[in-house]
Amino acid sequence: MNFGMRCHDICPKGDIDTVLDTVKSNNIHQIQLAFGKSIAGYDFSAGHYSPGFAHMIADKLKERDMHVAILGCYINPTDPDEQKRKAAVAKFIEHLKYAKIIGADMVGTETGRYNTDFKVVPETYTEKCYQLLLKSMCEIVDAAEKLGVIVGVEAVHDHTLYSPEMMKRFLDDIDSPNVEAILDPVNLIRAEDCQNQEAVIGRALSLYGDRITMMHIKDFRMENGEPKFEHVGDGLFHYEQVLAWAKKEKPYITMLLENSRPDRYHRDVAYLQKIYDEV
């Protein structure tokens, strides 16, 4: 398996050399890199891109034998404030240009909430919100197709694409080979699904497993009736189902550990690899 971590879980935000040296010192080669969360001293909003700066990043990654599996640009494509939504879309499109030069497999995002402060609100689950997502993503995907870059989209139980069925609908509606799914199985599990998690994950694998090309891996616990993040192997998630699927259908798929730490990473990878070998 190809395992990796999110850069901002490995070390605090800093200058690019310090951050990448820290990643290398932990013997981690596959990363999710979110510029705004990891690299200080540069404005990554729209209008500040240059090929020269992107090539500088590419060279530093190559020097350290490091690959960006996901260039994270986690915007709110359903922000009801039209100016903020447009700015978010422009930022994402600019990240597509970085991705092409630094060799990232995709630019990834979740699908937002219908709230400018990103609060959980009922409007997120409405048709109006879904249509706003389509509007944003059509603009993004048009640019991605022209640039030859992949857009990775991740469903989350309290975001616009809140279920496997909504993700399937979105993939069909957007209808582009430049859009692929990022599967974070824990993010699909609502409180009421805790005891029946295999059914939810099974629906995702059945409905759009062919479009899943990247995975996020973490665990969860229940706290006051709500799922909360937990380290790999320390919570309630059953890994056998997704790892058996990956072994059969997606060998060598990249799995990025979330909410891990450098001092846990290699132990967590060994834990997952053992299950993978046995299923």
Image (spheres, rainbow, N blue to C red):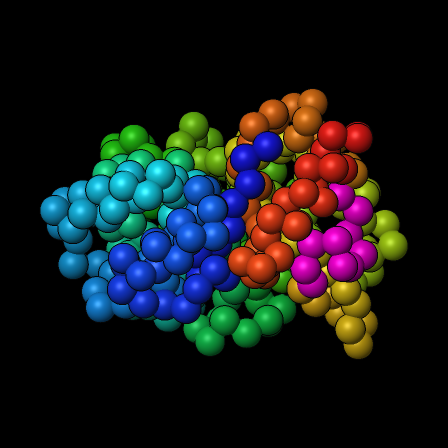
Task: State the residue lying farthest toward the top.
Answer: 248
Q: Residue at x 54, y 35 (%)?
A: 2
Task: State the residue lying farthest toward the right.
Answer: 195
In the image: residue 256, left or right of residue 187: left
Q: Residue at x 52, y 64 (%)?
A: 113
Q: Quadrant of the N terminus?
A: top right
Q: How many marks?
A: 0
In this view, the residue in front, 232 or 133, is 232
Residue 246, quarter of the rendered image: top right
Residue 240, quarter of the rendered image: top right
Look at the image and tell me whether residue 144 can be seen.
Answer: no
Magenta residues, as a range?
A: 230-239
Q: Residue at x 56, y 28 (%)?
A: 252
Task: State the residue lying farthest toward the front.
Answer: 25
In this view, the residue in front, 48 or 170, is 48
Classify 232 as above or below 105: below
Image location (x, y in percent) of residue 19: 35, 59
Q: Quadrant of the C terminus?
A: top right
Look at the image and tell me whether residue 215 can be seen.
Answer: yes
Q: Residue at x 46, y 76 (%)?
A: 117
Image location (x, y in percent) of residue 229: 67, 64
In this view, the residue in front, 215 or 128, is 215
Is the stretch drawn in magenta largely helix, strand or loop?
Answer: loop
Image location (x, y in percent) of residue 196: 85, 50
In the image: residue 121, left or right of residue 115: right
Image location (x, y in percent) of residue 183: 60, 43
Check if residue 213 falls in the magenta segment: no
